[in-house]
Amino acid sequence: MHPDEKPATSRPLLSGPVIALIAFFTLVDLFATQAILPLLAHAYGVTPAAMGVAVNASTLGMAIGAAVAALFGDLVDRRTGVVVSLVLLTVPTALLAGATDLGTFALLRVLQGLCMATAFTLTLAHLGAVCSREAQAGAFAAYITGNVASNLFGRLIAASAAGAFGLKINFCAFAVLNLVGAALAYLTVRPSPTAAVAGLSLSDRLRQLTVVAVPGLAAAFGVGFSILFAFIGVFSYVNFVLMQPPVSLGMMNLGLVYFVFVPSLVLTPLAGRVAVRIGTRRTLMAGLGVAGAGLALLVLSNLAALLAGLALFAAGAFLAQAIATGFVSRAAGARRSAASGLYLASYFSGGLVGAAVLGQCFVRYGWPACVAGAAVALAIAATLGRQFEVSDAR
């Protein structure tokens, strides 16, 4: 056992709903801004691809923050780290209301990502430490469920607030949500003692990164990269498809589209149970298969087909993400903090690369090319995921 960890309990110290709520308030800023991407592109006078990269620059901050938190997160009390990160998150969120150029907007999004990643990584480390091996799958599934909820309600809030009151009010509203999340974490996450490994040298800390050599973990990092690559690309640029002919939705109706995440809210909490019943690899493949079926519907220029495709794609992607996240924590053992940080760094790097690459596909070759790029990413994830079962049985 890692010297800074307490013995795992049979159940998490936080209940499932509280875990989900903390995840919601931690990540609500991450994807909500995608819902107003067309409005932002118009306001800044740039192409969809340029605005897509700026909006998703938060994933760069997430990748950096996750890696740093994994290496040095043991130096702080986890509750303090989560609370301070969420309080600091309100600063760039509020400043986005007054960003005057695309560069400033992108920089503030990076800073948002740094804050979100720190809270995200420290929370996952906390859950990994206080949950037994059997309870971890359920705890991580609850956290991913909160992530799903942030995708649904965050986008709905953003589309509604921006459509009714404008972009400035939208970002101020999200700053308030950040403060609510900080208060919830302060009230519900138990303090943890400063880690006994706080005296480790930098070289010792960097040596923790050799956890990548654990069988299956490098593949898991690739799976995470590929999942968010596809997810960011699809949900960033589908907004333009939905607002253009022949669909031609308005901003308020566009917000309602994000009820496609409701099936994900139902299915994601079941990920842990399904994995126990049929195995980690099979569950991962099932999730990727459902996501792929959704992509097949997204090339149709019909609103009903688009909605069904988005619902299937989201449900499959979130199911696969929950499985990959739980696998990383179990396979890494005592080095779960470093492994989780590396996984999240890879995962969020995939989001930024997906925004850039699939944005160019969308601008240069159209929506079908964007969907095809996402399908390739899912195929890569499925290939890498074949390593999961053997490693998980160790």
Image (tube, grey):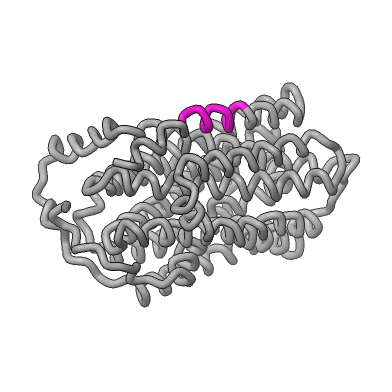
Q: Is residue 380 magenta?
A: yes
Q: Is residue 51 visible?
A: no
Q: Is residue 39 visible?
A: yes
Residue 9 relative to residue 370: left or right: left
Q: Position of residue 361 (x, y in %)?
A: 68, 25
Q: Position of residue 246 (x, y in %)?
A: 90, 40
Q: Is residue 305 magenta?
A: no
Q: Position of residue 340 (x, y in %)?
A: 34, 46
Residue 372 relative to residue 55: left or right: right
* Chief SS of the magenta region: helix
Q: Quadrant of residue 376 in the image?
A: top right
Question: Residue sitting at 64 percent across and 30 percent down?
Answer: 375
The quadrant of the picture occupied by the C terminus is top left
Question: Residue sitting at 21 percent across and 54 percent down?
Answer: 74
The magenta segment: 376-384
Front residue of 160 and 24: 24
Question: Residue sitting at 82 percent across and 44 percent down?
Answer: 305
Q: Quadrant of residue 205 in the image?
A: top left
Residue at the top extreme? 364
Front residue of 48 and 376: 376
